[in-house]
Structures are given as C-alpha cells and as structure tokens.
Amino acid sequence: MSAGRNQALDLEDLLNPDEQRRFRRLCIETSPEELGELGAVIELHVEQVAANAGPATDVDTARLIGRSLCRLLGSGADFDADQRAQIRGAIEYFVMTDDASSDLDDVLGFDDDARVLNAMLSRIGHQTYAVELPG
C-alpha cells in the first residue's frame, strides 16, 4: 500500500465526510513565509472566540487548538509543500465560521476543529501536538 493511500485512510478514519471535504478544500499551496504569518491569525481568532463566547462556547478547547497550531508553527520543523498545505488547511478550518458545528453556540463546537487538527498532525507525523478531547 502506498504512503498516499495510508494518508487517505487517516482522513477517512478520523474525519466524517463533511469534515474531510471541507479540510481538503482548504489545503492550498502555502509558502514557508505565508505559513509563518498565520500564527497571528490563529491568536486573533482565539481572542475573538473568547471575546464573543456564549454560555455554550468551549473556549478552553479553542485555546488548546490555537496553542497546538502555534507550537507547530514555532517548532522549527522544515515542512515540505504538502505538509504546509495541510497545516494551512487545518488553520483555515479552525478560523472558519461556518464549519460542521457552530463554534460559539455549541458546547461541542470545537470538537470538529480538534479532529481536523489531529488528523492533519497524524498525516504529517507531528502527533505530539494533538489535542485530546474528553470522552
């Protein structure tokens, strides 16, 4: 079985079809410089989530996801073009407001973001940055 097929199985095993489709659409070519600039986007998004949080918003999970993504970006790893595209996809999924579940209105709103993050980390071999969800 080829490595590409193993990666496809990772997505199929870890994400539902809608999450897979959205994530793949967001995986776009990204230069190392562009990738480095996305840390500020992540931090701003987490700040906005905290500022606009409702009673059901899981701000802690949003912070964990943001922290994980920023640590990955700051890890000093030399990501290839495919890895950069996948990291970009996970970041864009995280900051997207119309993803699979409402981030601000659903207590499980960031669970899909965490699944996308963890699937991406598994694919690029950086599982140490995975976010553990309860249950």
Image (cartoon, rainbow, N blue to C red):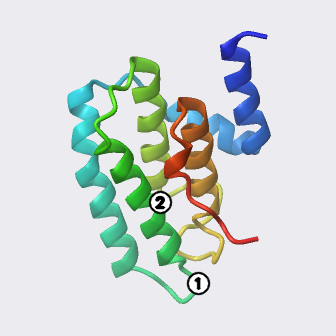
Residue 75 visible somewhere in the drawing: yes
Choose between 20 and 3: the one closer to the eye.
3
Does residue 21 lie above or below 18 as drawn? above
Does residue 133 lie above or below 20 as drawn? below
Does residue 115 lie above or below 63 as drawn? above
Looking at the rendering, which quadrant does residue 23 occupy? top right
Residue 71, percent across and down? Answer: 35, 51
> In the visual, does 91 lie left or right of 22?
left
Residue drawn at x 58%, y 56% is 114
Residue drawn at x 63%, y 75% is 106
Element at badge 2?
helix
- Cα separation between marks 2 and 1: 17 Å
Residue 87, percent across and down? Answer: 44, 37
| Quadrant in the picture for the C terminus | bottom right
Residue drawn at x 72%, y 10% is 2
Element at badge 1?
loop
> Most extreme residue toward the bottom, as rendered?
55
The residue that disc 1 covers is 56
Looking at the rendering, which quadrant does residue 56 occupy? bottom right
Answer whether labels 2 and 1 touch (C-beta < 8 Å).
no
Q: Which of labels 2 and 1 is toward the front?
A: 2
> In the visual, does 53 lie left or right of 15?
left
> In the visual, does 99 lie left or right of 81?
right
Residue 99 visible somewhere in the drawing: no
User: Which comes sooner in the sequence, label 2 or label 1?
Assistant: 1
Residue drawn at x 58%, y 77% is 105
The residue that disc 2 covers is 65
| Quadrant in the picture for the N terminus | top right
Residue 6, percent across and down? Answer: 73, 22
Q: At label 2, which amino acid type do we have?
A: Ile
Q: Is disc 1 surrounded by few (<14), some (14 to 19) or many (20+) residues within 10 Å?
A: few
Q: At label 1, which amino acid type do we have?
A: Ala
